[in-house]
Image (tube, grey):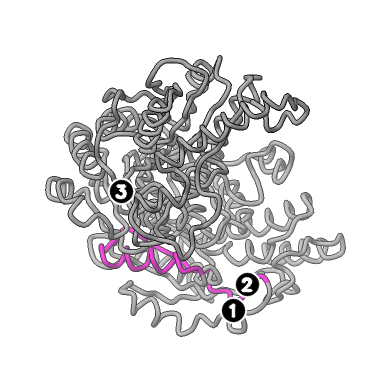
Amino acid sequence: MPMTDPLTDTAARIADSIRRTTIDQSKRANVGHIGSALSIADILAALFAGPLADVDPSDPDRHRLVLSKGHAVLALYGALHACGRLTDAELDTYCGDGSHLAGHPEHTLEGIDFSTGSLGQGLSLAAGCALAARLQGSERIAFTVMSDAELNEGSVWEAAMFAAHHQLSRLVAIVDVNGQQALGYTRDVLDLEPLAARWESFGWDVHEVDGNDLRALGDTLQSLRMDGGAPHVVLARTVFGKGVTFMENRIEWHYLPQTDAEYALAAAELERGEK
Amino acid sequence: MRREFIEALVAVAERDERVVLLTGDLGFAALEPFSERFPDRFFNAGVAEQNMVGMATGLAEAGLTPYVYSISTFASMRGYEFIRNGPVLHDLPVRIVGVGEGADYSHNGITHYALEDVALMRAQPGLTLVNPASSGQVAPMLRAVQDLSGPAYIRLSKLSGSVPGLPDEFELGRAHRIGAGGSIAIVALGAMASNAVAAADLLAERGVQASVIVVSSITPAPIEDLIAGLSGVSLALSVEAHYVTGGVGSLVAEVIAENGLGCRLIRAGAQAAPAGVSGSLAYMHEQLGISPQRLADRVLEALQVRSEAAVLQVPNDAAVLL
């Protein structure tokens, strides 16, 4: 039995809440992208229990978060909700008419720094945030959460080169390495490995971590040096659909919404896990 | 107009520390006045336009005013979706600077010809789109654009020089008319104003009077000035170093149609990609049908149709009548 600590306990509470929100809201709205959201529940929980815990969305000097894999936004709404930044009523507008809570994040919602949804753009946005922080003498950090499949986009590597060349040490890219993309496993579509070596060869400070281990994620985030040197990439090896067994590592849960029976099964498993 | 632009940008940056300049590895012997004066605010993003625009979005979100610089084709098209999802969607003050209008890059060929950038940028709501007509318009243009809270696309001709009759002034949403009234108006975009004025001179030699309306602010569009300039005009000729679709010819067509102006429009500009055809700028303007002589000929041909139609008294085909 691993020792617990307050930060990890908080993260665990947030992660549970994100998963519950993901299952409930995707069912209510009858939409998909469930597996992708579950995949980053622990990553967002570690961020919102850690460096993003006290972020004031109205503070221009706040840390920035770019959810580059915008299709997993339900996990971000879940995190904001778990931290008291979104009400139940707001959450219940998800994917509804006139809602700010769309199927991909929009910056018009307080707490969302950038609208995303087109893959391969987030790292450039975050690199700009980090460069701005340097120019303005600020200690704010730019975080981006990316998918592994979006590394297919050439623009990611444009940003990777720039950030390393300019040693943007306040840039943190967390890649959700769940090994899946819309139509197949990444190893079958466009193999990304050796992923760590690729990032290292681009001049990044590379960390590989179990992306569903909250303690490991938290420790890794805390260990990153922000006072100069290379930008950081955390290769978070996750299980796609983590927390709902019948969704785990299944391609179809990129897109499928849940049937009533599937929802009942998923909700029951989450409830068991939370006890 | 690169030299004028950089001089003006240095002047703006002297008093506004928000200004940052990024280049996609272009601007040799052009950007140095800025990069040497403000080395900490100058970044060569490398040959990577998408990332350059994406980073500019992040810079602008933090309160800076980034200018991203490249050849118009690369500046407008390579990172188009980044422009759309970044500064346009977030309404942020990124300035995209494209050098070269139409076939300005002459012998470099079609990949360097900006023939659809105006159409692409016109389609983006909230994006200011300017195309100075003369060197003297560049500095006032930049002063007008700098303080905008939203994004802008600045289309710069490679040519420097003045346009006879055009003052060194610039105002967003305004056009400038050169020459008095008459029933013929030539509406020119950006540096095509020079060819338009030269065409008007050729027409004057033939006893045909034409005014020239210079459009250097496309978005916001100079609607009222176009209405005023085209009222009482029976034939308008639009001129642009651009495809005839989506640029100033389309803008003029919209103004005529939406305001019920009784004016026939002929659009001069590229009809097809000039693939396999390159050469000097004068040669390319001839090929694209936008040289002074070709423009004057378009007007004379249209007048010929009218006079023949009048002689033959065949008023049934309204499409060919003025």
Is A169 contained in the magenta span? yes
Tell me residue A29's x, y (percent).
77, 50
- On screen, residue B71 versus residue A56, left or right, reads left
Disc 1 residue crowd, few under 14, some 14–19, many 20+, Cα 10 Å: some
Q: At x 60% / y 54%, what residue is drawn?
A: A73
Q: Earlier in the sequence, mark 3 or mark 2?
A: 3
Direction from residue A261 to residue A69 in the image, left or right: left
| Magenta part of the chain | A153-182
Residue A5 shows in the view: yes
Nearest the camera: A227 or B87? Answer: B87
Q: Which mark is residue A132?
A: 3
Label 2 Cα neighbours within 10 Å, binned few <14 / some 14-19 / many ≥20? many
Figure quadrant of residue A238:
bottom right
Instruction: Output the chain of dot 1.
Output: A
Which disc, if any, is residue A186?
Answer: 1
> Can residue A10 be seen in this snapshot?
no
| Mark sitting on residue B103 | none
Left or right of B222? Residue B107 is: left
